[in-house]
Image (cartoon, grey):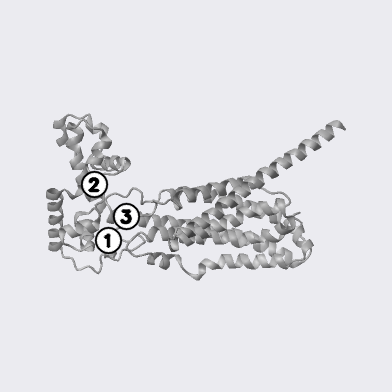
Amino acid sequence: MPDAATALVLGHSLVTQNLLIQTSLAAMALGISLAGAVAALRARRGEEGRWLAGVFALLGAMSATPLMANLWLSGFVFYLPVLLPVLFALLPVLHRYVLEMATMTSDDGGESAKKGGDGRWHLVLPALGGVVTAGFWALPDDDRRAMLLRGVMPDGAFPATLALASFGLILVWNVVSAGYLVSIVRHLVAYRARLRDLLSNVAGFEMRWVEGLIGLLVLLWGVVALSLLSDNLTQNSVSSPQWVLLLTICVEMLLTAFGLSPGRLRPLPQASDDAPQTPVDLGQKYAKSALSADNAQRIAERMERVMRDEQLYMDPNLSLDKLSRRTAAAPNLVSQTLNETLGVTFFDYINTWRIAAAKPLILSDQRSILEIAYASGFNSRSTFYTAFRKVTGLSPNQYRKLEPQSDQRIVE
């Protein structure tokens, strides 16, 4: 008997400890999400801020579930079905947020985000989730408790239909999730390609942190899907709520660190061409252009002259718009000349000049590689190393070990 009593006390203590940890994590996640939503709205970033606030709000709605379960059980039974539309709405809202970030800093003023990210079909899955939620609310209280708390299927076709609908929607949601993730990645790829047509230094604009966010969300969505299925269809939960909360906190912290960073958003220089926001071939991109081969050659010669004589590449903030003004040519014509005639992006063209200026300094100058990078127009060590290796096939340190006369053997 003492052993049984001790085991009972230890078991009760462990359950209490787990509930305390779970409640603390849920309160932390809910607090971060509420603070993030308020901060996003107060930042006055227009559409981007509103969609970011929506992401925080939906994460907060997910975080509130364990608090309801531990502190208000009757409310939890009524609240748990709300997770379906909340979960289904998170992806469309996140998708729109990323599209706003990838377009609002470019020359189209965010219109491409509205074209690519809008549409009533984004509301279909959340709306169906809302219908299932209403169905659970329509159940008698005893049946709802049996299904959501004990995992017991009540008699009748309606409860069985709700369970099957929940299961089917979550399966569909997993497929749709993959489509949203692919769309986000495609827009990021197109956005980064567009950056290289506009800027000579893209550090701080590429939004590399979004890949980490996607990875965390994939883990979170998988754990939540398992939790929802097990809570609705079985007596035992497959996934621990602590894992859901920890992943939610990680997502919220990442969004807070990068999405709410005061210096994250810097406007890109405007260009007059109507740039597509999805990858296209050059023939399609410039199909309506009237630039002749002779005019393109003249623009290329003017660009080379101003680069050589005025050393525009030394400006770390050099943009396509600045170069077009110096060459007295429209930005879209300069871009077409670079892409079609010279076969390079604006980013690669400028950095080739910078590397040419850096090479003799590396061989003859005693300054550090980083100092030479800054002196050549770069504003990022990683960008300099990547560009240098692309042009010379060597790292700057490897190149410095060469004899000065061997410089001529390096392929330009």
- Could you say which is closer to the camera, residue 69 or residue 114? 69
Residue 71, percent across and down?
71, 52
**Contact? badges 2 and 1 (CB < 8 Å):** no
Distance CA(mark 2)–CA(mark 1): 22 Å
User: So how many labels did they put on this image?
Assistant: 3
Left/right of residue 135 with respect to residue 42 in the rendered view: right
Q: Position of residue 379 (x, y in %)?
A: 29, 44
Please identify, in this view, whether the residue under mark 1 or under mark 3 is nearer the observer: 3
Look at label 2 and name its amino acid: Asn
Across and down, in percent, residue 299 comes to 15, 59
Question: Is residue 337 in view?
Answer: no
Residue matched to label 2: 351
How crowded is the residue under tag 2: few (<14 C-alpha within 10 Å), some, or many (20+)?
many
**Mark seen at residue 84:** none
Mark 3 sits on what residue?
195
Which is more toward the observer, 322 or 83?
322
Residue at horizontal 38 percent and vertical 54 percent from the top: 265
Which structural element holds mark 1?
helix
Instruction: Please name which of the two marks, 2 or 1, marks the residue nearer to the observer.
Output: 2
| Spatial separation of the CA atoms under disc 1 and disc 3 | 16 Å
Element on which disc 3 rests: helix
Q: Which kind of residue does numbered mark 1 sit on?
A: Leu
Q: CA distance from mark 3 to mark 2?
A: 14 Å
Asked whether residue 191 is in view, the answer is: yes
- In this figure, which residue is indicated by the disc labeled 1? 282
Question: Callout 3: few (<14), some (14-19), or many (20+) C-alpha neighbours within 10 Å?
Answer: many
Q: Earlier in the sequence, mark 1 or mark 3?
A: 3
Q: Is residue 4 left or right of residue 62?
A: right
Q: Determine whether the residue tagged by mark 2 lies in a helix, strand or loop.
A: helix
